[in-house]
């Protein structure tokens, strides 16, 4: 038999094709771990539920994978003959059966929502579960997260936070490493920033004095009154004019929410160079009227 005849017989041989089809039937390659599939529950038992997902064998959902919430009635969590979504959490066994989960699908969706919220710079409500030296453990939609002590508004009495609900911003959302880090301080700052605008008169307390300027707390936001923005006249020592704890009024000169910076000015409130140094109290008392005058002043 020549090679051409052998090739022709192999090409026309139904046995080869049947054999190939049978080999494919042994493994249903369309179902893999991590895949989201649709299916209908057709049988419930004490340990879980059997689901038709269109494979050659039925799939199985263990009872503890039926829902993110505690399951008391399996029929309620997995109603019969309803089209439901599942996540494949275990590849096919020897019989070709895959293991499914509704619980882990819900967790997957929550992580996706949290990542989207982080991308949109949204805040979220979290409930404090436990405290430790490093910060507090919180819960959000069934997911555990952590707020470091340095990112809490109240950093001294952490025990008092237990059971409380906090508004927080996202620092890190990492589903692969099950890592969710949040910040209460950033959320507070962001909320406060939304009330600020250029040219606005604000009032705050002096928290620190440096050679280059004065730090002012604006309800959780750290602002800087630079030495050059205190007065139109040169000032050599800021401590002659300011002290820690002092309330002052100033106009917002610059805003940078991304870096959390606010630049202030009392210089713009002066009617003449050096007025802030000569009559500080008068400038503060009439600060609102002076600010209004600034807004109405025609641009040069």
Image (cartoon, rainbow, N blue to C red):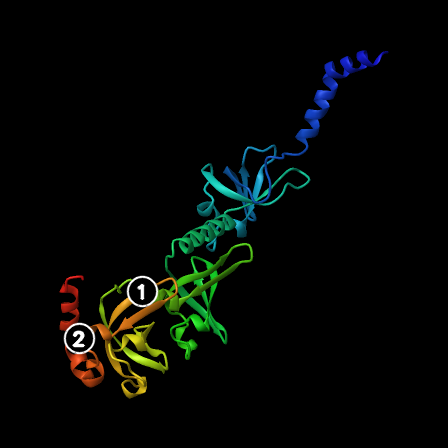
Q: Splitting the image into 4 quarters, where does residue 23 fall?
A: top right
Question: In the picture provided, is 120 more to the left or to the right than 268?
Answer: right
Q: Is 131 in front, or is 219? A: 219
Which numbered disc covers residue 255? Answer: 1
Say which element carries label 1. strand
Q: Position of residue 266 (x, y in %)?
A: 24, 75
Instruction: Estimate the spatial distance between the alpha carbons at disc 1 and disc 2, rounded to whole Å.
Output: 20 Å
Question: In the picture provided, is 31 more to the left or to the right than 136?
Answer: right
Crowd band around label 2 with a 10 angstrom C-alpha radius: few (<14), some (14–19), many (20+): many
Which residue in the rendered view is the most extreme toward the right? 1
The reply to whether residue 244 is in sight is no
For the N terminus, give its image quadrant. Answer: top right
Q: Is 59 in front, or is 30? A: 30
Say which element carries label 2. helix
The reply to whether residue 105 is in sight is yes
The residue at which mark 2 appears reads as 287
For the C terminus, give its image quadrant. Answer: bottom left
Question: In the picture provided, is 98 more to the left or to the right than 212?
Answer: right
Q: Position of residue 250 (x, y in %)?
A: 24, 74
Sequence-earlier tag: 1 or 2: 1
Q: Position of residue 289 (x, y in %)?
A: 13, 72
Q: Position of residue 281 (x, y in %)?
A: 18, 83
Which residue in the rendered view is the most extreme toward the bottom? 240
- Whether 242 is drawn above or below 56: the answer is below
Crowd band around label 1 with a 10 angstrom C-alpha radius: few (<14), some (14–19), many (20+): some
């Amino acid at each position: 038999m020549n090679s051409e005849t052998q090739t022709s017989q192999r090409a026309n041989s139904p046995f080869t094709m049947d054999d190939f089809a049978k080999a494919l039937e042994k493994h249903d390659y369309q179902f893999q771990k991590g895949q989201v599939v649709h299916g209908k529950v057709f049988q419930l038992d004490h340990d879980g539920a059997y689901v038709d997902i269109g494979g050659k064998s039925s799939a199985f959902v263990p009872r503890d994978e039926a829902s993110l919430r505690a399951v008391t009635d399996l029929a309620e969590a997995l109603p019969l003959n309803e089209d439901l979504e599942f996540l494949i959490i275990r590849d096919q066994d020897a019989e070709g059966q895959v293991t499914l989960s509704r619980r882990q699908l819900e967790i997957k969706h929550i992580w996706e929502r949290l990542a989207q919220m982080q991308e949109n710079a949204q805040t979220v409500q979290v409930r404090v579960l436990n405290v430790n030296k490093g910060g507090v453990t919180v819960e959000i939609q069934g997911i555990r997260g952590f707020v470091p002590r340095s990112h809490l508004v109240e950093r001294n009495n952490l025990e008092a936070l237990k059971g409380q609900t906090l508004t927080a911003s996202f620092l890190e959302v990492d589903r692969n490493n099950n890592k969710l880090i949040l910040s209460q301080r950033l959320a507070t700052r962001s909320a406060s920033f939304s009330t600020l605008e250029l040219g606005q008169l604000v009032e705050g307390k002096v928290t620190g004095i440096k050679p280059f300027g004065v730090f002012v707390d604006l309800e959780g936001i750290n602002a800087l009154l630079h030495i050059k923005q205190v007065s139109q006249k040169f000032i050599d020592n800021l401590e002659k004019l300011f002290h820690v704890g002092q309330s002052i009024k100033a106009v917002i000169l610059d805003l940078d929410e991304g870096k959390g910076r606010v630049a202030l000015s009392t210089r713009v409130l002066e009617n003449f160079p050096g007025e802030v140094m000569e009559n500080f109290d008068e400038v503060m008392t009439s600060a609102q009227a002076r600010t209004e005058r600034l807004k109405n002043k025609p641009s040069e």
